[in-house]
Image (cartoon, helix red, strand yellow):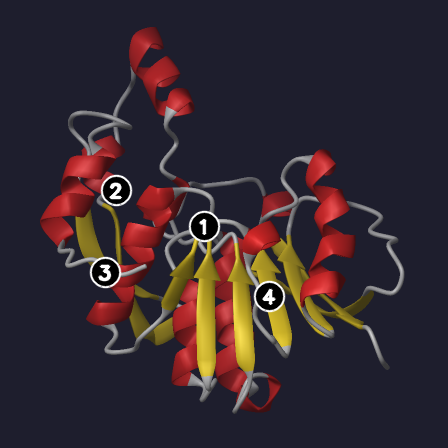
Amino acid sequence: MTTALNSDQLNRLITAMHPAASVTVQQLPECPDIRLWLVEPESMRRQFSQDEILQIQAYPAYWAFCWASGQALAQNILQHPEWVSGKTVIDFGAGSGVIAIACMMAGARRVIACDIDHDALQACEINAKLNQVELELHDDLFTLDVDADLLIAADVLYDRANLAFLDVFLEKAPEVLVADSRIRNFDFPPYFTVSASDSFTVPDLDESDEFRRVTLYRADKNP
């Protein structure tokens, strides 16, 4: 699933969220080796009408933000390349592609960025090119048939209904890493806590402190 894409296409896509929105290349403060095309904060820094708010809610363009959990997990992977080195990795809910890109930079053999949002897959491809790495793209985890070593996912548990994916992840790979800042009292064996740290979304949405605390969980099918 490959196409020739450029940032102009991302700028066209982001106007579905708001006509005044645009994307620019932004360096991640916690992962300075990674740059992403993200929504330009100044283009969104004003009061919105009710109609504009509804339009943003209808198309929130998740791919145009590097969410706190994504930045935190990408940072962890770059600090611990042994987690992914030489492995085939699935990045579920890839969004901007930040974690998939970090995996390739850390020496992964193969990374599949998986997202149901085709706009996100375009963002993954363009951001991979910006960072001079190559990703494979897929739009449906359930139809993805690959002999993966590791599945990673960040900020995908914003809806409690998505907790069912935790079991699916272990069907797709023997090792799973999940980064989340939403679920409290996380108790889903065989997942266990690896670490916790403070992070933030880029561009910064001035989220409350509770959503800046990112916890990393791990599960192993064959511990």
Mark 2 vs 4: CB contact within 8 A: no
Answer yes or no: is residue 132 visible. yes
Q: Position of residue 134 (x, y in %)?
A: 31, 75
Amino acid type at circle 4 is Ile
User: Which circle marks residue 139 in the picture?
Assistant: 1
User: Which circle marks residue 152 in the picture?
Assistant: 4
Amino acid type at circle 3 is Ile
Distance of mark 4 from mark 3, alpha carbons? Answer: 20 Å
Q: Position of residue 158 (x, y in %)?
A: 63, 39
In front: mark 2 or mark 4?
Answer: 4
User: Which circle marks residue 126 in the picture?
Assistant: 3
Q: Dot 2 corresponds to which residue? A: 41
* Residue at (19, 34) in percent of width and height: 21
Give the quadrant of the C terminus: bottom right
Which mark sits nearer the N-terminus, 3 or 2? 2
Which mark sits nearer the N-terminus, 2 or 4? 2
Amino acid type at circle 1 is Asp
Which mark sits nearer the N-terminus, 1 or 4? 1
Distance of mark 1 from mark 3, alpha carbons? Answer: 16 Å
